[in-house]
Image: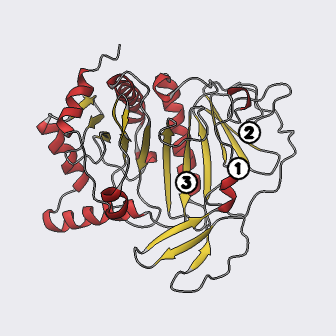
Amino acid sequence: MRRTATHLADGRELFYFDLRDDAERGAVDTRDLPPRPAASELRYDPLTEEWVAVAGHRQGRTFLPPADECPLCPSAPGRPTEIPSPTYDVAVFENRFPSFSTNLGAYPQVGGLSEVRPGVGRCEVVCFTSEHDSSFSMLSPERVELVMEAWIDRTVALSAMPGVEQVFCFENRGPEIGITLPHPHGQIYAYPYVTPRTRTLLGAARRHRERTGGDLFADVLAAEREAAERVVAANEHWTAFVPAAARWPVEVHLYPHRGVPGLDGLDPAERAAFGPLYTEVLRRLDGLFGVPMPYVSAWHQAPVRVGRDLAYTHLELFSIRRAPDKLKYLAGSESAMGAFVNDIPPEETARRLRAVITE
């Protein structure tokens, strides 16, 4: 793998990750770009004890452009994009419309009980391929390994940034999910706090350890592998299963068989084994209803400074599609109370996913 660092016209960093050591990455961004926006403001909700980012500049971000105006495709003569090179394997760059950044502005207090502070952090875009009409499920095992190396490289770098408390790698896929760019890509958020979901998981893991002395995630994995009913696919190093209490109509978790706090803790064999299993699962999702499956794919890694002894890196993949022509909308119970109701038994979802022919 070769990693090349450069800058875009407005000073944002861009990183190329290439399978070939002789890839030429000297192209320069010639665009005349506006100044970078100030970082969002964080407002504290005393009722939920959670932080909310207010980022008004994101209202102006690019929204579903035609293919010949895609900002994630390689640059071409007369059509400069976010990626100056005429081709690339994997490219990572700072988001032009970030939820968090280090470009600070003024942050007056708003009164009441809500504290305000700068949204310090970083948001990056990860382009999985230069092919506009491709998808993650179509990537070769070597390309998936390269994407994983990019995730690891950026996780380590962002974790070292002042003020960053958690790094989150994820992909949103499909217009039903609310994507703004259809080009195959994901994102990385470097948060200035530990997210609510992670606090919940680590709290459960801590209480489980106090009760049993065991590792909650390892115990969940062992129980699912023993039950086997909800396992979708597995290999020597990873198991993909539908969780017993799945919230979403289609939900699959991928666990490595060895617990590590972050992606950088995976050894070469574990990294290589991830791609074939994950892309198989993605193809099963696409084959479930005969239409491309919209999904969120979310890596759970340990926070930078807390709970690292409790965390267990794994991927959670879920979709809002419950039938070929039906979506699950988060209505009153889910949105207002956080109380999920799943229309499809997890065992049925697992059975149907195993039955999909992927060859």
Q: Where in the figure is residue 146, as x and y percent of width and height?
A: 54, 32
Looking at the picture, which amino acid does disc 2 mark?
Glu
Mark 1: which amino acid?
Arg
Marks counted in the figure total 3
Q: SS class of the residue under badge 1?
A: loop
Name the residue that disc number 3 marks.
Answer: 189
Please tell me whether residue 122 is drawn above or below residue 120 in the rendered image.
above
Number of the front mark, 3 or 1: 1
| Residue 283 visible from this viewpoint | yes
Q: Is residue 11 left or right of residue 225?
A: right
**Any part of residue 159 in sight:** no
Question: How many residues crowd around disc 3 within 10 Å: few (fewer than 14), some, or many (20 or more)?
Answer: many
Decide which of tag 2 and tag 1 comes sooner along the chain.
Answer: 2
Given residues 110 and 34, the one toward you in this image is 110
Q: Classify mark 2: helix, strand or loop.
A: loop
- Circle 2 residue: 82
Please name whichever residue, 96 or 225, is drawn nearer the observer in this view of the structure.
96
Around disc 2, counting alpha carbons within 10 Å, would you say few (fewer than 14), some (14 to 19), or many (20 or more)? many
Sort mark 1 into few (<14), some (14-19) or many (20+) by Cα contacts within 10 Å.
many
**Dot 1 corresponds to which residue?**
96
